[in-house]
């Protein structure tokens, strides 16, 4: 009689999703859409590589500065949203571990994996916002030097 043993591959299991993760994903999507809308608005007024049309337009420079400031606020808000999600998830995770009176190593690994996933998503969005803001600041600099 053959006796088979089976092993579990923990990498194939999906970690539990934190309670506010769907809302966090919605926030990240809204952040990307808002930043993209701001970029499209700026590019409609002066398409890429045709900035000289707005050389003497002070209203366009002011619009660039307002957009840059807004993107800075979105960046800070993204980090704060991730911090709130991480804090709430950590509390929920610790509460579950305390109620079970047992700590298994794979649960800790799932928690670390969840935190790193959320942080990676936040950093990708922040990188997008940073590059967009950098582009806008370069436009402001070019317009000020052209005067």
Image (spheres, rainbow, N blue to C red):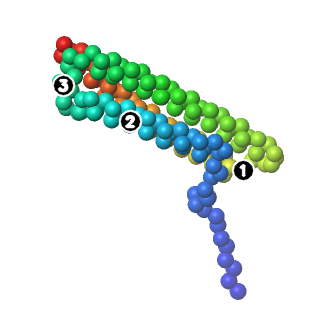
Which residue in the structure is indicated by mark 3? Answer: 53
Residue 115 image-quadrant placement: top right
Q: CA distance from mark 3 to mark 1?
A: 63 Å
> Quick one: label 1, few (<14), some, or many (20+) residues within 10 Å?
few
- N-terminal label among 1 and 2: 2
- N-terminal label among 3 and 2: 2
Q: Give SS at disc 2.
A: helix
Q: Give SS at disc 3.
A: helix
Q: CA distance from mark 3 to mark 2?
A: 21 Å
Assess whether mark 1 and mark 3 are in contact (beta carbons under 8 angstroms).
no
> Quick one: label 3, few (<14), some, or many (20+) residues within 10 Å?
few
Assess whether mark 2 and mark 1 are in contact (beta carbons under 8 angstroms).
no
User: Image check: 54 left or right of 16?
Assistant: left
Q: Give SS at disc 1.
A: loop
Q: Position of residue 93 (x, y in %)?
A: 71, 43
Which residue in the structure is indicated by mark 2? Answer: 37
Assess whether mark 2 and mark 3 are in contact (beta carbons under 8 angstroms).
no
* Residue 142 in view here: yes
Q: Position of residue 91 (x, y in %)?
A: 71, 37
């Amino acid at each position: 009689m053959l006796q088979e043993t089976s092993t579990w591959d923990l990498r194939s299991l999906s970690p539990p999703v934190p309670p506010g993760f769907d809302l966090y994903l919605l926030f990240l999507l809204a952040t990307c859409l808002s930043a993209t809308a701001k970029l499209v608005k700026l590019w409609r007024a002066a398409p890429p590589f045709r900035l000289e049309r707005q050389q003497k337009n002070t209203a366009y420079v002011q619009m660039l500065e307002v957009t840059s400031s807004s993107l800075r606020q979105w960046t800070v808000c993204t980090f704060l949203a991730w911090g709130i999600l991480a804090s709430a998830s950590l509390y929920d995770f610790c509460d579950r571990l305390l109620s079970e009176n047992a700590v298994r190593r794979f649960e800790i690994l799932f928690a670390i994996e969840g935190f790193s996933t959320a942080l990676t998503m936040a950093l990708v969005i922040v990188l997008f916002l940073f590059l967009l803001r950098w582009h806008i600041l370069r436009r402001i600099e070019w317009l000020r030097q052209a005067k």
